[in-house]
Amino acid sequence: MNSISSRITALFIRHMQQAVGSLGDLWRTPFTSVMTVLVLGISLALPATLHLFVKNAHDISKQWDSASEITLFLKLSVNDKKAKNLVQRIQLYPEVTKVKYISAEDALREFKILSGFGQALEYLDKNPLPATILVTPLKRFSQSEAAKDLLVKLEKEREVEQGKLDLEWLSKLEAMAQLIEDTVMGVALMLCLSVVLIIGNTIRLAILSQKEAIAVMKLVGATDSFIQRPFLYSGVWYGICGGILACMVVAILAQYLSIALTQLVALYNSNFVLQGLSFNECCILILLAVLLGLVGSYISVSQHIRTIEPTAD
C-alpha cells in the first residue's frame, strides 16, 4: 500500500516539475509565446463575442413576450355598453390573460397629447377614432402562430372592425438571432481548427529546436511519453493564457458596447442592459482553449517525437 502511494506521489511530483518546467520554457521565448497567446486570444474572442450578441438577442426577445398583444379596433357604431359586453366575453376566452378597454374619447385625448395637434383636432365635428380593446394572450398563446389563430377568432366578433397583431418585427429579430447563432457555430468551428493548427505548429518548432536534446534523452533511456509531457503542458499553458486573454477582450468589448447601447436605449425609454459573459461561460471558454491547446500539442508531439532517434557518431 505504501509503495502504491509513494508511486502516485512521485508521479504527481514529476508531472508538477514538468508542468513548471514547460512554463519556464515559454518564459525563455517571450516573443513567440506572447504572439501565440495573442493569436489564440483574438481567435477565441471572435466567436465568444458573437455568442454574446446571440445571448443578448434572446434576452431582448424574452423581455418582449408582450409583443404579441392584440389590438382590436371596434366599429364606430359600437357604443360603450356594447364594447364593455364584448370585453366581458373576451375575458372568458381560455387563451386570454388580460383585456384592456380604451374608449373613443380616451383614444382621442391620448392622441391629442402625443400628436401635438390638439388645437387642430378641436375643429373636428365628431371623433374619428374608434374604441379599441387591447388583448394580452397567455404565454403559451403568445407565440406567432398561436397569436395569429387567436386574432382570427377575435375578428369574428360582430363588434370588431379590424384586428392588428404586430409580430413581423419580432419574427425578423428571431430570424436574425438564429442566423447569427448559426454563424457563430460555423465561425467557432473554423477558428477552433485554426487554434489547433497554430498550437501544433508552435509545438513543432519547439520540438525541432530541441531535437538534439530529445535524441540524447532517448539515448539514455527516456520514454516517448516522458519526452512528450513537457510539450503537452506547453499546449495547456497556451490554452490557459489564450482563454484568459479572450475573456478579457470580450469583457472590454462588452463594456465599450454597453456605453454606446445605453445612449441608444435611452431614446426608447428602455432599461435594457447588455449582459457580458458569466463566470461559468468564462470558465467554459478557458476550458475549451485548454482542450484545443492539448489537442494541438498532442497531434504535433505524436508525429514528431517518434521520428527523432539518436544517431551513432
Image: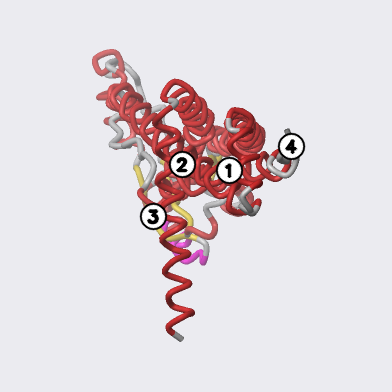
Q: Is residue 185 left or right of residue 20?
A: right
State the scheme by which the image is colored. secondary structure
Q: Nearer the viewer, residue 97 or 9?
A: 9
Residue at horizontal 65%, vertical 47%? 218
Distance from Cα at disc 1 to Cα at disc 3: 65 Å
Question: Residue placed farthest to the top in the image?
Answer: 120
Disc 1, SS: helix
**Pointers 1 and 4 in contact (C-beta within 8 Å):** no
Q: Amino acid at mark 1?
A: Leu
Q: Amino acid at mark 3?
A: Lys
Distance from Cα at disc 3 to Cα at disc 2: 79 Å
Q: In the image, residue 130 lies at what x, y percent?
A: 43, 35
Instruction: Pick whichever of labels 2 and 4 is earlier in the sequence.
Output: 2
Specify whether residue 75 is in view: no
Tell me which corner region of the image, top left, top right, bottom left or bottom right, holds residue 250.
Answer: top left
Disc 4, SS: loop
Question: Label 1 crowding class (10 Å Cα cut-off): few <14, some 14-19, many 20+?
Answer: many
Question: Residue placed farthest to the front in the image?
Answer: 313
Distance from Cα at disc 2 to Cα at disc 4: 26 Å
**Pointers 3 and 2 in contact (C-beta within 8 Å):** no
Instruction: Pick whichever of labels 1 and 2 is earlier in the sequence.
Output: 2
Magenta residues (range): 87-94
Residue at image mark 2: 22
Specify whether residue 269 is in view: yes
Residue at image mark 1: 292
Distance from Cα at disc 4 to Cα at disc 3: 99 Å
* Quadrant for the C terminus in the image: top right
Residue at image mark 3: 84
Question: Label 4 crowding class (10 Å Cα cut-off): few <14, some 14-19, many 20+?
Answer: few
Residue at image mark 4: 311
Q: In the image, residue 127 lies at what x, y percent?
A: 36, 28
